[in-house]
Image (cartoon, grey):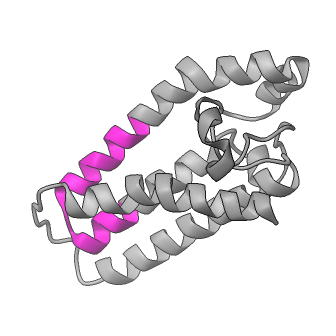
């Protein structure tokens, strides 16, 4: 239960900041007309993204025996919990090695539709580029070192993104 609570705390601090607070309150608003369906489309996109994110969190808790906290947050483990102790390879992780990152980007795209804001669309691309850099430069080398052959085998079966 404590792991699930820490996962929710992590989610309220990190993804909520990246996916809602920054784009909604710090980016300028440049209105673009997304059409009369933009409100409905945005709600569907954000709902799917939220469900994917929550599915990933549960996979980390149940299968990985940890939280979404990344390895460099070790000093905050009392609040955010520990990174997964096992490689998470089931469910959505069969389709993508990073569905949680994808869900955050998808949520931002939904928010861009909701707000009809061009800068939020651009921000979604910047966030994805940043996630890609973090995954390639830091996360994957760490996971290769931590899980060894198990992770190398997983890489062969699952794509980095889609």
Q: In the image, which residues are magenta?
A: 109-129
Which residue is depicted at the point 87% across and 24% down?
A: 153
Relative to 109, does residue 64 appear above or below in the rendering? Answer: above
Which residue is depicted at the point 45% across and 60% down?
A: 16
Q: Nearer the viewer, residue 35 or 124?
A: 124
- Residue 117: give x, y in percent of width and height: 19, 63
- Residue 147: give x, y in percent of width and height: 84, 23
Q: Is residue 128 magenta?
A: yes
Q: Quadrant of the N terminus?
A: bottom right
Relative to 68, does residue 113 appear above or below in the rendering? Answer: below
User: Can you see residue 161?
Assistant: no
Q: Is residue 68 magenta?
A: no
- Residue 54: give x, y in percent of width and height: 66, 65
Main SS class of the magenta portion in the image: helix
Which residue is depicted at the point 64% across and 44% down?
A: 69
Relative to 128, does residue 142 appear above or below in the rendering? Answer: above
Relative to 33, does residue 27 appear above or below in the rendering? Answer: above
Which residue is depicted at the point 34% across and 67% down?
A: 111
- Residue 90: give x, y in percent of width and height: 85, 49
Q: Nearer the viewer, residue 84 or 112?
A: 84
33 on left or right of 50: left
151 on left or right of 44: right
């Amino acid at each position: 239960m404590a792991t699930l609570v820490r996962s929710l705390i992590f989610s309220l601090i990190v993804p909520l900041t990246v996916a809602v607070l920054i784009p909604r309150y710090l980016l300028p608003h440049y209105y673009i007309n997304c059409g009369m369906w933009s409100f409905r489309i945005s709600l569907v996109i954000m709902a799917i993204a939220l469900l994917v994110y929550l599915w990933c969190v549960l996979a980390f808790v149940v299968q990985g025996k940890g939280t979404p906290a990344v390895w460099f947050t070790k000093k905050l483990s009392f609040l955010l919990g520990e990174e997964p102790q096992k490689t998470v390879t089931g469910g959505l992780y069969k389709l993508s090695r990073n569905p949680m990152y994808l869900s955050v980007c998808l949520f931002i795209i939904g928010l861009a539709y909701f707000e009809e804001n061009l800068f939020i669309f651009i921000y979604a691309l910047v966030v994805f580029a940043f996630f890609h850099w973090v995954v390639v430069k830091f996360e994957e080398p760490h996971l290769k070192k931590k899980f060894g052959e198990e992770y190398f085998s997983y890489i062969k079966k699952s794509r980095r993104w889609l």
